[in-house]
């Protein structure tokens, strides 16, 4: 069974204080790992897809990296508007369409 | 371009009642999905569709039904609502299948069953 564990559950940062969120996964074979951002009361918003170990993708202050067991979402010099819940999901070789989601990390960035 | 829209935004049902959650997308996407998100839990796939007239069960389909008569619409039907169906429901769509097909989510429907 595919599993995704995100840590920490919640993270509070000061504006400008860089940090990383972790997504550990267990799958039979990885077809893709996804990062989403979810604001309160809204649907998830797509950020990145990573396909293989060693891959990195960047968008503004966010950089996602992937190893064979985990992914990190690095946040550089965060701003208050980066506050949100960040979700990680995986698609395995044993699943055509079913993404397995983690519970998310609630990030709060204080001014 | 409205993307994925869902109605209603909020709904309270009594045990045993039925309702349909509406989902429409204007991006001409072939693939559509229904998820539920329970507090403190990850999203779980209820049903999905790969095109008009084609639907299949996801991870947690019991108590739900879907239909896909057009490319744009993918309604989710709850029959005989139960408290365990209290959740936030998200509809999503993608142009192609995952992992390459990015899933775009609607704003959600918050359902409470009392």
Image (cartoon, rainbow, N blue to C red):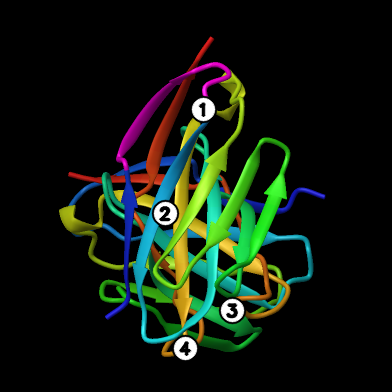
Label 3 marks which chain's residue? B
Please check whether the numbered discs 3 and 1 fall on a single chain. Answer: no
Q: Is residue A21 above or below residue B64?
A: above
What residue do we see at 18% from left, 57% from top? B84
Magenta-span inclusion, residue B53: no
Residue A83 rendering spot, x and y as whole percentages: 51, 27
Q: Earlier in the sequence, mark 1 or mark 4?
A: 1
- Marks 4 and 2 sit apart, C-alpha to C-alpha, by 26 Å
Give the residue at mark 3.
Answer: B68
The answer to which quarter of the image holds residue B11 is top left
Q: Which of the two residues, B88 or A27, is positioned nearer the viewer here? A: A27
Question: Horizontal and vertical percent for residue B27?
Answer: 78, 63
Q: Residue at x 73, y 73 (%)?
A: B95
Residue at point 36%, 61% (across, down): A24
Of discs 2 and 3, which sits in the foreground? 2
Classify mark 3: residues with Cα within 10 Å, few (<14), some (14-19) or many (20+): some
Q: Are marks 1 and 2 in contact (CB under 8 Å)?
A: no
Q: What is the crowding at mark 2: few (fewer than 14 residues within 10 Å), some, or many (at least 20)? A: many
Q: Give the distance between the C-alpha atoms of the residues marked 3 and 1, in whole angstroms.
A: 36 Å
Left or right placement of residue A47 versus residue A33 in this view: right
Q: Which region shows up in magenta?
A: A8-17
Residue A93: which numbered mark, if any? 4
Q: Quadrant of the C terminus of chain B?
A: top left
Q: Nearer the viewer, mark 4 or mark 2?
A: 4
Circle 2 residue: B89
Q: Nearer the viewer, mark 1 or mark 2?
A: 1
Kindly state the secondary structure of the residue where label 2 is placed.
Answer: strand
Q: Looking at the rendered structure, which numbered label has been put on residue A83? A: 1
Which of the pair A63/A37 is nearer the observer? A63
Residue at the far right: name it: B1
Q: Secondary structure at mark 1?
A: loop
Tell me the distance, in whole angstroms, between the alpha carbons under discs 2 and 3. Answer: 17 Å
């Amino acid at each position: 069974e595919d599993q995704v564990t995100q840590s920490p559950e919640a993270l509070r940062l000061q504006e400008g204080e860089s940090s990383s969120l972790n997504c550990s996964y267990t799958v039979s074979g990885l077809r893709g790992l996804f990062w989403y951002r979810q604001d309160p009361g809204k649907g998830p918003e797509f950020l990145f897809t990573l396909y293989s170990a060693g891959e990195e993708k960047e968008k503004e202050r966010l950089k996602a990296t992937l190893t064979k067991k985990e992914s990190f979402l690095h946040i550089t010099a965060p701003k208050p508007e980066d506050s949100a819940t960040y979700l990680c999901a995986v698609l395995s070789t044993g699943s055509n369409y079913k993404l397995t989601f983690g519970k998310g990390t609630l990030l709060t960035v204080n001014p | 371009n409205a993307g994925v829209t869902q109605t209603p935004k909020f709904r309270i049902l009594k045990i045993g009642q039925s309702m349909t959650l509406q989902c429409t997308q204007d991006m001409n996407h072939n693939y559509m999905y229904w998820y539920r998100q329970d507090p403190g839990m990850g999203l779980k796939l209820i049903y999905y569709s790969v095109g008009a007239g084609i639907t299949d069960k996801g991870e947690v389909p019991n108590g739900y039904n879907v239909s896909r008569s057009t490319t744009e619409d993918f309604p989710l039907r709850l029959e005989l609502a139960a408290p365990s169906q209290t959740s936030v429901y998200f509809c999503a769509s993608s142009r192609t299948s995952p992992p390459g097909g990015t899933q775009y989510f609607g704003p959600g429907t918050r359902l409470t069953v009392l």
